[in-house]
Image (tube, grey):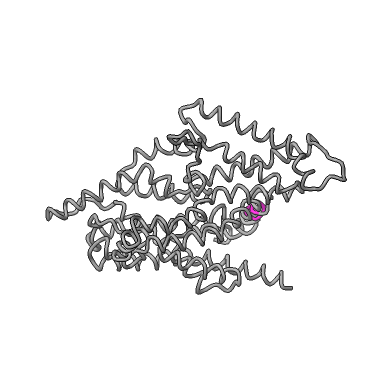
Amino acid sequence: MAKQDGFLQKKLIPLLQKISAERHMIALRDGMASAIPMIIIGSIFMIIAQFPIKSYLHFMAHVFGPNWATVVQYISNASFHIMGLIAVIGISYSLARSYKVDPFSTSIVALGAFILTIPLKTDKNGALWVPLQQLDSSGLFIAILVGLFVTDLYVWVVHKNWTIKMPESVPPAVSNSFASLIPGAIALFVVWLIRLGVEATPMKSIPNVINFFLQQPLSHLSNTLPGALIAELLVCVLWIFGIHGSNTVAGVMQPIWLAAMAQNATALKAGHALPNIVTQQFFDNFVHMGGSGATLGLALMIAFMSKSKEYKTLGQLVVGPAIFNVNEPIIFGLPIVMNYKIIVPFIAAPLANVLTTYFAMKWGFVAKTMGVMVPWTTPPILSGYLATGHISGAVLQIFNIILDTLIYFVFFRNMDRQKVKEEQQITA
């Protein structure tokens, strides 16, 4: 044990700290942090639009005309669903500034490069439009790569002095604009060539690259325990790298889980035993409590147990959305993306939930989900009862939340202590 602690303290932790202090990692952290205000705003209006009370949802759908919930989510679309745009600008800006290159011009070029990776759609009148889903967390991984790659390429060209230099009498804004012409053109040209290369493959477009490599292996999984564990592991690992794991995996697995849910509903109506354990509600209501990574327990600790001033403030912002299973604020605010300090519990907690839920239902301690499509924003305890029609579902959720909190506790405590030390050093 002492040898293991020595290895961690002397070798692994210093290495990870060195990696986290590297300029690209700092740019990634700061760029993602710039999206936090918009994420929180979008989360609030998402909850307003989908507050999980049947009468309220009916009110939102009919009282003010058809689909009033969609109208409320206009603000979510304008904030929550532009994470990719914000990330590519923020990452590029931060990285360029670390190189002492004009960050504004660089981030504008990176934004153009990001849009260049997206296949535009055409309406019936021939007008072009950008699919919104490619600008939000679905396109986040591409935004991260573009923000880092294009900025490095831009900076490399600038350092080669392949720029148009204006007289000193020219205002800086104009001078910077002309200076960005050649680096910007080269960066966009390279991204254009990459896009043409990808379009010549079966993947057809850059956004399809991730799905292309994931869809084939995922299609072999089913609604079994091994399939549930592998699917959940992929969800967590993808999130750690800034990819919306839930959406990516659900694109392939959701039809299987929804079909299993429908089979349970049919069996319930016929008075037969429920055949399936792993369904859509299995994940929505018993695994992802607080969102991907089962972060509700973590959010509660940040809100009520933090000693750090920064974490106390963050806790006030993340705990509300977490109760309704919206955890983008904590994923990007803590952050969890690319954060080695929290990776282990972020993976372990939901996998533990998969195991406890599966065996609790298999052994008959907890009722199986009965095929009711409980809104994913329904708070835990209530959702467990509604999904199973039995109090045992709520009890299992309480057990899982406590288990998740214990899994996160040591890691949260270490992070909080480290943050307190940093705040004390700044104050001193």
Query: What residue is drawn where x is 50% and y is 38%?
Result: 207
Q: Position of residue 333 (x, y in %)?
A: 55, 60
Of the pair 411 and 174, the residue shown nearer to us: 174
Query: What residue is drawn where x is 52% and y is 55%?
Result: 79
Q: Is residue 209 above or below residue 75?
A: above
Instruction: Determine the image quadrant of residue 381.
Output: bottom left
Of the pair 56 and 29, the residue shown nearer to us: 56
Of the pair 195 and 129, the residue shown nearer to us: 129
Q: Is residue 48 visible?
A: yes
Q: Is residue 19 above or below residue 199?
A: below
Query: What residue is drawn where x is 66% and y is 53%?
Result: 26
Relative horizontal placement of residue 164, taking residue 184 as reference (left or right): right
The span shown in magenta is 15-20
- Magenta portion: prevailing SS class: helix
Residue sticking out furthest to the left: 271
Q: Position of residue 298 (x, y in %)?
A: 48, 65
Q: Position of residue 305 (x, y in %)?
A: 52, 74
Q: Is residue 92 above or below residue 413?
A: above
